[in-house]
Image (cartoon, rainbow, N blue to C red):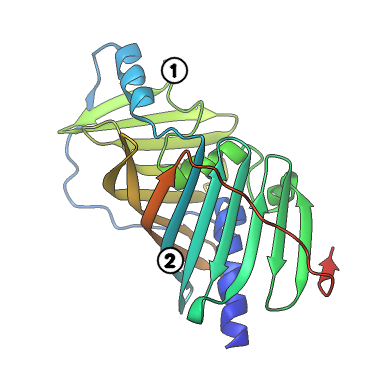
Amino acid sequence: MKRNTQIKILVLLSVILSGFGCKTRKEVKPAVVPPVVKVTSNKSAVIAAINSSAFEFNTLSAKSKVGLMINTNSNDVSMNIRMQNKSIIWISVTAIAGIEVARVLITPDSIKVLNRIQGLYTAKPFSYIYQYANKQITFSTLQNLFLGNAIEGTVTESSVFSVHENQTQITSALSGMLYKLIMNANNKVVENTLQDPKGQRLIAKYADFQAVNGRKLPYSINLSSNATNRNIKIDLKYTSVSVNESLDFPFSVPKRFTVKD
């Protein structure tokens, strides 16, 4: 049980912090590919519509059920997620019987982790993730992945727009990263692919859009990444979401914990 719980902690942190560093996954393409038609309408109008459909908040609190798979090991946990726009991501991970096994506090400057199973505390600068991820990954990127928003700077006049039926595909290159977005008819992201020059890729898929404070938020988020010896999938489903309420982000280190370098 202890080992399984440790695996859960490592998988969650790997997905949140280093999932961007995994190599691309080979997929079987369909035999017939529908034709793609270039967008001829005003790009500015399309961009404005996408921006106006983005999920906005000051604070957000969410409860979620998470299915995790690393190679052949599957696990289920619950996550309480709290965010303050552009400044804090706070996550509490609980396992069987609601026992908290880990707590994470991420800011634009730092990453702090409490591993309650092993009694360990880790504090690193945000740049720590660049040991595993492209340096263009930012705090804003992480928040937008939880919200299903387009990554900042990836939908611009220089992006390539194409349409098929009721979906719009947008591709762009930004600081060495290739981004591909697929938007639905309501200008919400249903698929977001991030790829670096080495072909390493993360795919995020969004579904079950529900109204929260007058905006649509995906209640189903699927993240997948693949490496030579590690295949990770996370299936997150929000069970409740509230926004713009007063929140705290408790994070204190028990005296008995060992500080891990």
Mark 1 vs mark 2, CA separation in Å: 36 Å
Residue, x 39% and y 50% (percent of image)?
A: 241
The residue positioned 38% from the left and 57% from the top of the image is 238
Mark 2, secondary structure of its residue: strand
User: Dot 2 surroundings within 10 Å: few (below 14), some, or many (20 or more)?
Assistant: many
Point out residue 29 in the picture as x, y percentages from the top left corner.
27, 53
Left or right of 44 in this view: 23: right
Q: Position of residue 171 (x, y in %)?
A: 40, 30
In the rendered image, the vertical position of residue 246 relative to residue 161, given as above or below: below
Give 88 or 72, whichever is nearer the viewer: 88
Label 1 vs label 2, nearer the camera:
2
Residue at figure coordinates x 48%, y 34% from the top left? 151
**Residue found 51% across the figure and 34% down from its top:** 58
Residue 137 at least partly seen: no
Left or right, 31 with reference to 227: left
Left or right, 67 with respect to 123, comes to: left
In the rendered view, tell whether residue 200 sits above or below residue 14: above
Q: Which quadrant is the N terminus positioned in?
A: bottom right
Considering depth in this image, is 35 or 48 the residue closer to the camera? 48
Depth order, front residue of 232/111: 111
Q: Quadrant of the C terminus?
A: bottom right
Residue marked by disc 2: 66
Amino acid type at mark 1:
Ser
Q: Which numbered dot is residue 158?
A: 1
Answer with left or right where residue 26 lies relative to residue 123: left
Q: Position of residue 119 (x, y in %)?
A: 75, 75
Instruction: Kindly identify the amino acid type of the residue bearing the numbered disc 2.
Output: Val
Q: Quadrant of residue 104?
A: bottom right
**Element marked by disc 1:** loop
Mark 1: give few (<14), some (14-19) or many (20+) Cα within 10 Å.
few
